Amino acid sequence: MISLFKQQKRLQNRLSFIHQNYYKSISLQDIAESGNMSIAQCYHYFKMIVKMSPYDYLIHYRLLKSIDYLLDSTFNITEISEKVGFQNVNHYIQRFKGAYTLSPKKYQKNIEKGIYNNANSFSFFHLTISIQHK
């Protein structure tokens, strides 16, 4: 059995792969292969340590990155969805609304009004930071 430390280290490599490639079309197989893991192992490590699937993590990370673009009002929602790796703008909007309870456009308007900023985003992403720094 692999120690928890080794499992976390292997997972960190997968997280790094996602962070470096989130804007591309990547699959669970791509994530697993980036660390010489099977799909089953990769899925297991994510569920055990991050408490979500690799795909869910990828989507959440893309949503987090999209907030950076929402802060810069020079990009429209379609451009933002493409920049963060969503193949379909409607899928991006749907996932954003599911995570934040409002549309990306409404979120962007709230930023312009000073209601939101990138500092008061999601508790989920504190997990990302803590896993990376262990």
Image: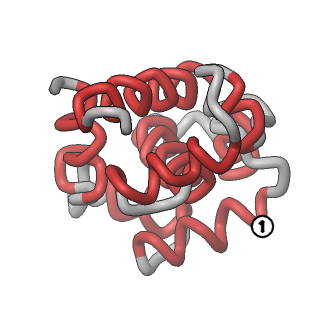
- Determine which quarter of the picture holds residue 113: bottom left
Residue 14 place in picture, x, y as percent: 51, 29
Residue 3 against residue 104 in the figure, above or below: above
- Residue closer to the observer: 132 or 126: 132
Residue 120 against residue 20 in the figure, above or below: below
Residue 20 place in picture, x, y as percent: 55, 19
- Determine which quarter of the picture holds residue 21: top right
Query: Counting other residues with Cα less than 10 Å from the Cα at mark 1, is it few (<14), some (14-19), or many (20 or more)?
Result: few
Q: Quadrant of the C terminus?
A: top left
Which kind of residue does numbered mark 1 sit on? Answer: Asn
Residue 48 place in picture, x, y as percent: 37, 56
- Determine which quarter of the picture holds residue 103: bottom right
Which residue is labeled 1 in the image? 90
What residue is at 30 percent from the left and 40 percent from the top?
128
Residue 112 visible in the picture: no
Q: Is 86 left, or right, of 70 in this rendering?
A: right
Q: Quadrant of the N terminus?
A: top left
Residue 35 visible in the picture: yes
- Residue closer to the observer: 19 or 74: 19
Q: Is 100 left, or right, of 127 in this rendering?
A: right
What residue is at 37 percent from the left and 61 percent from the top?
51
Q: How many marks?
A: 1
Residue 41 place in picture, x, y as percent: 58, 44
What residue is at 34 percent from the left and 63 percent from the top?
110
Q: Is 58 left, or right, of 121 in this rendering?
A: right
- Residue closer to the observer: 44 or 128: 44
